[in-house]
Image (cartoon, grey):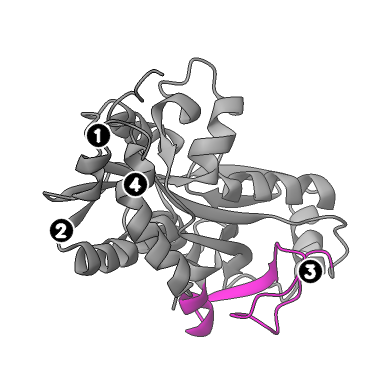
Amino acid sequence: MMRFDPPLTRRAACMLGVAAFGASSPFAAFAQAYPAKPVKVIVTYAPGGANDITARIYSQILAERLKQPFVVENRPGASGITGTTFAAKSDPDGYTLLLGAGGTMTINPGLFTNLSYDPLKDFVAVGLASRSPLVMVVPASLPVRNVAELIVYANSRPEGITFASPGAGTPLHLAGELFSRQARIKALHVPYKGSAPAITDLIAARVDLMFDAANSSVPFVRSGKLRALAVTTSKRSDQLPDVPTLQEEGLKDFDVSSWFGPCSHPPIPRARS
């Protein structure tokens, strides 16, 4: 189960109308009546991953509190660029929200040239929906029980190992690259259109490793389909208290997490003073 902070949820519900539209604009009265019709929520990855799960849970909460449907629409592809661009080019009326993430809003601008959207100019941040540690998971069939054994296993294979992610430039991808560099192993990145299809192949042992948001991978760890070797934050996860951190496993200063937050495509320019 995902863990949510109820005060943050209430604040996000209130801010959707005010923060997204700008209380200082001459359209503040319209913001107070928001939403007057169904709201589309864009998820930039395939269904089933942490991004998608977060969007669906919060959409249900917001629909109940604001008395209008919040409809999740998945638009995966190109490391989140496809869905984010769609949201950035949508009608600027506040009725298309984007569930922003670290990869799409902070990493992509520095990774890709000529990006088709500008996180600062095209979106207004509404709030933080969730933050999650990443967990390092391998197939249950892989003959390793801890990080040290994984490193030995990787070094014993001329081609190294493969690791999955929901796309190039995501925190999950960069966590894998950071690990392979610090552990001094050879690892081939295999990008997918979302965490769910990546986990499917991981469970089937078509890839060897994945760094995934704990919220989406913990159920598979508990069912025995995946094995958790470590978490990426500086402290252990409450969801996996017996799983060590990578820092405990000898990788210094390894501290990576993922976050999701709703964003609005600015509906109108602010009034000039």
Residue 9 shows in the view: yes
Q: Is residue 96 left or right of residue 245?
A: left
| Cα distance in 3D space between marks 3 and 1 | 60 Å
The residue pinned by badge 3 equals 149
Q: Are marks 4 and 3 in contact (CB under 8 Å)?
A: no
Residue 28 at x, y percent in the picture: 27, 39
Residue 147 vs residue 95, the one in the foreground: 95
- Numbered disc in front, either 4 or 3: 4
Query: At label 1, which amino acid type do we have?
Result: Phe
Q: Residue furthest top?
A: 114
- Give the class, few, some or many, for how many residues have Cα within 10 Å of label 3's Cα (few <14, many ≥20): few
The residue pinned by badge 4 equals 18
Assign a secondary structure to mark 4.
helix
Q: Which badge, 3 or 1, is on the more N-terminal residue?
A: 1
Q: Which badge, 2 or 3, is on the more N-terminal residue?
A: 2
- Rendered image quadrant of residue 11: bottom left
In magenta stretch: residue 195: no
| Cα distance in 3D space between marks 2 and 3 | 49 Å
- Numbered disc in front, either 1 or 2: 1
- Rendered image quadrant of residue 266: top left
The residue pinned by badge 2 equals 69
Query: At label 4, which amino acid type do we have?
Result: Val
